[in-house]
Amino acid sequence: PYLSVDPAPADRQDLTVAELRDRLMDTSLDLFTRYRAMFSLRNRNTEEAALALAEGFKDGNPLFRHEVAYV
């Protein structure tokens, strides 16, 4: 439904929003894994997922914050 080419595929559908948020915010994970969580949250299209995505603006990486803003 999105007119974009995502840099990573969405993560597994069986993960909860809380689990995806934890992956999104875990700076010990590589960016690819964090992006997978990001696009999974976007695909959920719920208020809970949007609030989890907004947490990404707290990240110290400007590129990561840019991607959060994009989605």
Image (tube, rainbow, N blue to C red):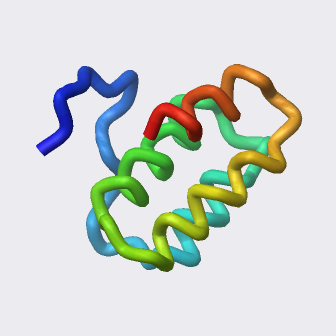
Q: Is residue 35 above or below residue 53?
A: above
28 sits to left or right of 32: right
Q: Is residue 9 left or right of residue 2?
A: right
Q: Residue at x 37, y 30 (%)?
A: 8
59 lies above or below 5 = below
Closer to us: 70 or 59: 70
Percent position of residue 33, x then y: 53, 40
Q: Position of residue 27 (x, y in %)?
A: 79, 43
- Occupied quadrant, residue 5: top left
Q: Quadrant of the N terminus?
A: top left
Residue extending furthest right? 60
Residue 52 image point, x, y percent:
59, 66
- Quadrant including the C terminus: top left
Which image quadrant for residue 69? top right
Frontmost residue, 4 versus 17: 4
Give percent across and percent down for residue 14: 31, 74
13 sits to left or right of 69: left
Residue under the image location 29 percent in, 56 percent down? 43
Q: Residue at the spot x=64%, y=57% of the render?
A: 54
- Indicate left or right for 6 with 52 as reference: left
